[in-house]
Image (spheres, rainbow, N blue to C red):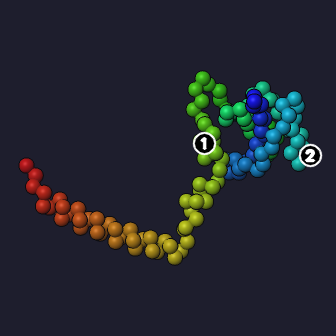
Amino acid sequence: MFKKKKYIAVFLRKENDGYTIIKKRRFNPNINSIKYNKVPIPINTVNYSFTSGLNLYYYISITDKRQLFFEKSKERLIGTKIIDMIINDEIISQITSNLNKSNIGMNIISMIFSGLFGGLVGFIVGGYIPIG
């Protein structure tokens, strides 16, 4: 009938300028530290990183062995979708998945053809429309 809050620890690894999600795990809120690979990392269950419904997410950096916080304000400017976009490397892999040497040559040819065709159509349409 009544739903309970879920406390979820999200373990992150720092890579370059961002973080990568390593593992997610539910935990009991009555603890002072959470273990990752048998190494205890202190956690403050009062201050969560963000919420989504009844889910309380706690971001924990395994490289720095500390909990990550976001600035709290009355209006949350950072939502769950934006945080996933920042952390997730899937977007970059989708953008660069079709780039290889054979596709680049074909793409350049199609871009040149489209530019010439578009310029020709623009010149014809622009030349036959009287101004004034």
Which residue lies at the image location 60% right of the left edge and 42% below the top edge? 81
**CA neighbours of label 1 inside 10 A, class few (<14), some (14 to 19), many (20+):** few
Direction bottom: furthest residue: 102
Measured as percent of width and height from the top left, residue 17 is found at: 66, 48
Residue contact at pointers 2 and 1, CB within 8 angstroms? no
Q: CA distance from mark 2 to mark 1?
A: 31 Å
Near-viewer residue (3 or 105): 3
User: Which mark is drawn over residue 38?
Assistant: 2
Q: Which residue is mark 1?
A: 81
Near-viewer residue (24 or 59): 24
Q: Is residue 2 left or right of residue 127?
A: right
Which residue lies at the image location 23% right of the left edge and 67% below the top edge? 120
**32 over 119 or under it: above or below:** above
User: In the rendered image, is residue 47 in sight?
Assistant: yes
**111 over 47 or under it: above or below:** below
Give the residue type that dot 1 points to: Lys
Q: Residue 60 appears in which quarter of the rendering?
A: top right
Measured as percent of width and height from the top left, residue 29 is found at: 84, 31
Q: Residue 27 appears in which quarter of the rendering?
A: top right
